[in-house]
Image (cartoon, helix red, strand yellow):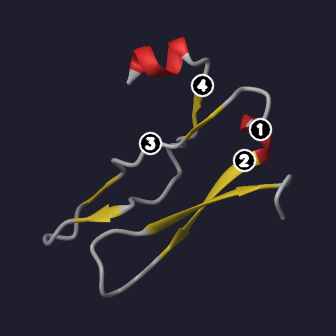
Amino acid sequence: MEALLIYDNLELLLNDSDIPTSLQYNGNGTNPDLTSASPDIADDVGREFIYDPGSEDFEIYIKSRYFD
């Protein structure tokens, strides 16, 4: 993954404040989803997490001011 980010000049869109996108049966959560964007639009791209009580994984919507 590191080579992909460097070779393709991408930025990883991950913040420590992001909610876990995958919940385990014991209630612990992880954030295995990696979203990336090119540096020229990375500041204008965000993620929205949609909770589905019937699923152990959250849906992730990529949002950009260019496509609102």
In contact (CB < 8 Å): disc 2 and disc 4: no
Answer with mark 2 or mark 4, whichever residue precedes in sequence. Answer: 4
User: Pointer 2: residues within 10 angstroms few (<14), some, or many (20+)?
Assistant: some
Depth order, front residue of 24/66: 66
Distance CA(mark 2)–CA(mark 3): 14 Å
Q: Residue at x 21, y 70 (%)?
A: 27
Q: Reply above or below: 1 against 12.
A: above
Which amino acid type is shown beneath numbered disc 3? Leu
Mark 4 or mark 3, earlier in chain? 4
Circle 4 residue: 10
Q: CA distance from mark 2 to mark 4?
A: 13 Å
Residue tagged 3: 34
Element carrying mark 2: strand
State the CA–CA distance, disc 1 to disc 4.
Answer: 12 Å
- Cβ atoms at labels 1 and 3 below 8 Å apart: no
Among the two numbered marks 1 and 3 on one chain, the one whose residue lies closer to the N terminus? 3
Give how far across and how far down residue 53 sits, in percent: 35, 86
Whether the residues at callouts 2 and 1 have beta carbons within 8 Å, the answer is yes
Q: Residue at x 39, y 61 (%)?
A: 21
Q: Amino acid at mark 1?
A: Asp
